[in-house]
Image (tube, helix red, strand yellow):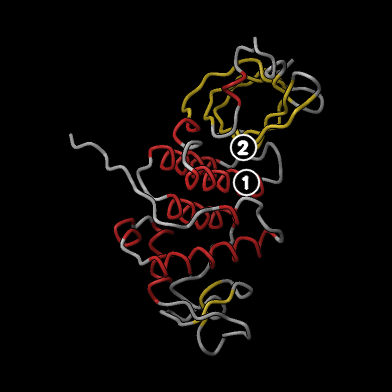
């Protein structure tokens, strides 16, 4: 028996037998791990509530033949407590987890940057420190950067000519100049492209000043770009609420 320990975020769970669950984790050192949590569906389980989606945990496992087995779990951050009671934050968080799951097709392959992105996004959603749609779009843009799919925003995706450019093509890889513009390209506003660049680079003062129309247009471009590269639709994205939500300000020290 080979024991190992890691920290991770629970991406999803599946029922197994009468009392067990298969838990999919995105971990700091081992990437995506699928492991059995035995007896967690029983009322007497010691750590059933610690292996639910949105939980950030310190976990001990031992290596099995097909699936690893969870032996100990300690909660580091119960992000779900600040997420599940609010529909916009809940749906955005579901999209974060589903995207992370899809981007880590290979199990046990290190994905430290993506792990940090997921933890950061869930923390921002749980704390209600920023608006949920902005947090989600920032996460999706940076996650696509991790996967090598980040859209070109300040230069032409085809020839590299510096922008700003007036057209955007998902198939071409982002913003395109008038010479490289393929048929079917869209023409987003410069405010929309500026918003996406601000989200990609963490310029929150600029992002939070963007108009509602720019946010909606930007969200559409981000979703289309992601799903083009994934070659399938995310089930959670159509459920995400794109209305402006109230953000609770942090208390002054």
Q: Secondary structure at mark 2?
A: strand
The residue that appears at 54% across and 75% down in the rendered structure is: 157
- Residue depicted at x 54% and y 63%: 222
Q: Quadrant of residue 230?
A: bottom right
Most extreme residue toward the bottom is 179
Left or right of 32? Residue 207 is: left
Please state which of residues 194 and 106 is positioned toward the viewer in this rendering: 194
Quadrant in the picture for the N terminus: top right
Residue at horizontal 44 percent and vertical 51 percent from the top: 135
If you read the primary sequence from the N terminus, does the residue marked by circle 2 or circle 1 appear first?
Answer: 2
Instruction: Give the position of the C terminus as an image quadrant.
Output: top left
**Which quadrant holds residue 30?**
top right
Mark 1 lies on residue: 98
Residue 252, position in %: x, y?
19, 37
Could you tell me residue 228's position as x and y percent?
Answer: 66, 65
Residue highlighted by disc 2? 11
> Going by the image, does 96 lie left or right of 17?
left
Return the residue nearer the eye: 16 or 9: 16
Q: Residue at x 70, y 39 (%)?
A: 107
Between 180 and 97, the one lying in front of the other is 97
Local packing at callout 2 (Cα closer than 10 Å; few below 14, some 14-19, many 20+) is: many
Q: In the rendered view, tell whether residue 57 sits above or below residue 164.
A: above
Q: Is residue 101 left or right of residue 213?
A: right
Task: From the top left corner, tell me how far across and down residue 102 is, in percent.
Answer: 66, 48
**Front-lying residue, 131 or 191:** 131
* Crowd around label 1: few <14 · some 14–19 · many ≥20 (10 Å): some
Q: Residue 249 location, x and y as percent?
A: 27, 43
Measured in 3D between alpha carbons, the distance from the residue under mark 2 to the one under mark 1, in whole angstroms, is 7 Å
Residue that lies at the very extreme toward the left in this rendered image: 253
Find out whether the residues at labels 2 and 1 contact each other: C-beta distance under 8 Å: yes
147 to the left or right of 210: right
């Amino acid at each position: 028996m080979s024991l190992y320990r890691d920290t991770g975020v629970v991406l999803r769970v599946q029922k197994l037998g009468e009392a067990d669950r298969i838990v999919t984790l995105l971990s700091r050192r081992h990437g995506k791990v699928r492991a059995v949590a035995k007896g967690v569906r029983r009322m007497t389980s010691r750590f059933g509530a610690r292996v639910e989606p949105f939980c950030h945990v310190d976990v001990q496992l031992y290596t099995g033949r097909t699936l690893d087995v969870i032996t100990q779990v300690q909660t580091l951050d119960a992000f779900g407590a600040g997420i599940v009671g609010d529909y916009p934050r809940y749906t955005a968080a579901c999209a974060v987890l589903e995207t992370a799951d899809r981007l880590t097709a290979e199990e046990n392959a290190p994905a430290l940057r993506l792990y940090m992105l997921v933890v950061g996004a869930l923390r921002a959603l749980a704390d209600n420190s920023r608006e949920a749609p902005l947090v989600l779009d920032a996460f999706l843009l940076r996650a696509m950067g991790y996967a090598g799919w980040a859209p070109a925003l300040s230069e032409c995706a085809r020839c590299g000519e510096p922008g700003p450019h007036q057209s955007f093509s998902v198939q071409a890889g982002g913003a395109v100049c008038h010479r490289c513009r393929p048929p079917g390209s869209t023409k987003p506003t410069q405010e929309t492209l500026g918003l996406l660049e601000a989200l990609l680079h963490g310029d929150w003062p600029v992002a939070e000043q963007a108009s509602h129309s720019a946010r909606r247009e930007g969200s559409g471009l981000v979703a289309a770009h992601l799903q083009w590269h994934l070659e399938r639709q995310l089930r959670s994205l159509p459920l995400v609420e794109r209305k402006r939500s109230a953000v609770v300000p942090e208390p002054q020290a």
